[in-house]
Amino acid sequence: MPDDLRPIIKKREIWVSYGTDSFAAAKQRHHREMAVVDALFADARKRLAAGGESPGITRKEAARLAQATVDDIHHAARAWFHDEEKRLLERWRAAGSHDGGAALEREEGLHALQDDQAAVHGPGGEEWAAEEARRALAARNLALPPGALFAEAVEAFHAAAKEAVDRAVQRWAGLPPEPPRDGRFADVTAGSPAPTPPPPAVTLGALIDAYMAAPERARLAPKTKAKYSGFRRVLCDLLGGETRAATITREDCRRAQALLLALPANAAQRYPDLEAKRAAEAAQRDGVRPMHPKTVGNHLDFLASVFKWGLKERVIRMADGNPAEGLNIATVKTVTASGEKRRPFAPAELTAIFARPLFTGCKDDDNGYDTPGPNRPRRGRFWVPLLGLFAGLRLNEACQLRVEDVREVDGVPVIYVRAEADGQRLKTQAAERRVPVHPELVRIGFLHLVSRQRATGHDRLFPELPAGKLGNYSDPFSKWFGRFLEKAGVTARGVVFHSFRHTFRDRMTEAGIPDSVADLLGGWSSASSKSEGSRYGEGGSIRFLAEHVARIVHPGLDLSHLYPSRDPEAAAAQAKVTLGSV
């Protein structure tokens, strides 16, 4: 249950028994129930926006917000006709089973049926059909809104009633059966199997929820789940969360793409009272820069994945296939044309970064990190950029390092990138790796940091770096680093912390390091790294990797001002380095 809706719905969880041991039946019931829950949440959000004071609907009432489709209506009418045929046939058989009175009872029954026939074919027949349609569909937890669907239901139930009573009159009058007047009921008799219900008509919101709840996504990281939830909110705003997923067309997805390209970053914070479509219009009016095209592409990729999953699992049926497939191709071209892809740092940008007071002498490494001063703190904010530059670590990989993740193997200091402790996470399976410590990191004093943290009993290498609300240490650091880059005058588009990894890869290429080795050091997946991974994975191979790491240089970047020889206290401590070994 979403945290913000608990005070409105007054529940923490919703439990439903599907009442069957059949997987197929449970799967069909599941998607109907997802639509019901989606409707319940939609109503709760409306009440939340209104202050939460209006009376809420019950779960049973929410179920009826799951709107009927034409297929639902036709099935309900055929099912009603099947039940009515059985009832009238049993009544006719019962009337003929009484000795001596059968003829009289059948005559009276025929007169009563002829009265019913006149009523059904008369002006009141449609009114009766409307009420019967509402009742039958409500029993299936389906709403019957006014308009074309309502007219369709009235016509279908009216036709079913006329067909049923006409057949009964022929039977009771002893006349030979006539061909069905309405072909929709030609194959339905009292002895035929009950009509098979149509596949559930799933809303877009329910389809996305089912996609996110699938077992293969059970272990998604909290940050990924939050990202998907954001995609869901925006896409449901643009396409309609209550829209039947199977009715969404390519044109609908194109319109959503156009609006996404106009939507600003953090639209929910900038325009909290506006839906995504209105927020896009407001951003254009206010001259607010839209979100990055890559972010737009992520939304479109997510939508395409949802439809692909729904079609594969047969949750939805779409005659024209996946309407969002390939939409991100145009977005990727937009990113390339705009020159806004993430890129490596230029030499001048690296010089500017490591010439800031944080690295040359500052007030402190908290709020005074960019104010010149006598102190040279060497904590997370100092070391994490250097680990990105000389070890190719992703931001979260560096921030979450533990003291035990830096070990000595065959006389070589090694950084273990792994997720063995609570709170540690890796982006991919290939991200788990061992990276020999670069000689420049040794010269700057990284091993002393490890030794000091081990001696003081710290578990984490950078215990002062907080985790974000989703548990990732990278989230707060990323925001700080964005401000740091602005103060350093490094403001070009496409330059972020991840640019250190791009720089690391480029320098490996320039050093002639084979792609298979580069993939292993950087934690990139590739066919070459999979086929040759065993060569560099264990034992003496760590020395081979260390030789390659030592070849990585950054031309034009002078970091000698960071060496401990410039700092007597750090130089003295540097002599006392102890590492664990394996």
Image (cartoon, rainbow, N blue to C red):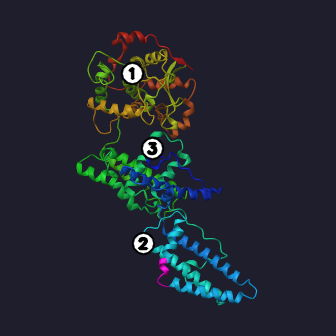
The dot on residue 148 is 2
Q: Extreme right residue here?
A: 99
Residue 567: x and y, percent? Answer: 34, 12
The residues colored magenta run 122-127
- Label 3 sits on residue: 3
Left or right: residue 550 compared with residue 91 = left
For the residues marked 1 and 3, what is the alpha-carbon distance in whole angstroms? 36 Å
| In-front residue for pair 453/237 | 237
The dot on residue 362 is none
For the residues marked 2 and 1, what is the alpha-carbon distance in whole angstroms? 68 Å
For label 3, the SS is: helix
Residue 471: x and y, percent? Answer: 45, 34
Examine the structure image and report whether residue 184 is included in the region drawn in magenta. no
Quick one: label 1 or label 3, which is nearer the N terminus?
A: 3
The nearer-to-camera label among 2 and 1 is 2
Residue 26: x and y, percent? Answer: 60, 56
Any part of residue 327 in sight: no
For the residues marked 2 and 3, what is the alpha-carbon distance in whole angstroms? 38 Å
Within 10 Å of disc 2 (Cα), the crowding (few <14, some 14-19, many 20+) is few
Examine the structure image and report whether residue 123 is included in the region drawn in magenta. yes
| In-front residue for pair 506/190 | 190
Left or right: residue 547 compared with residue 171 = left
Please report contact status of discs 2 and 3: CB closer than 8 Å, yes or no.
no
- Label 1 sits on residue: 379
Query: Which residue is rendered at x = 52% and y = 21% of the image?
Result: 407
* Identity, as a three-letter code, of the amino acid under mark 1: Arg
| In-front residue for pair 348/157 | 157
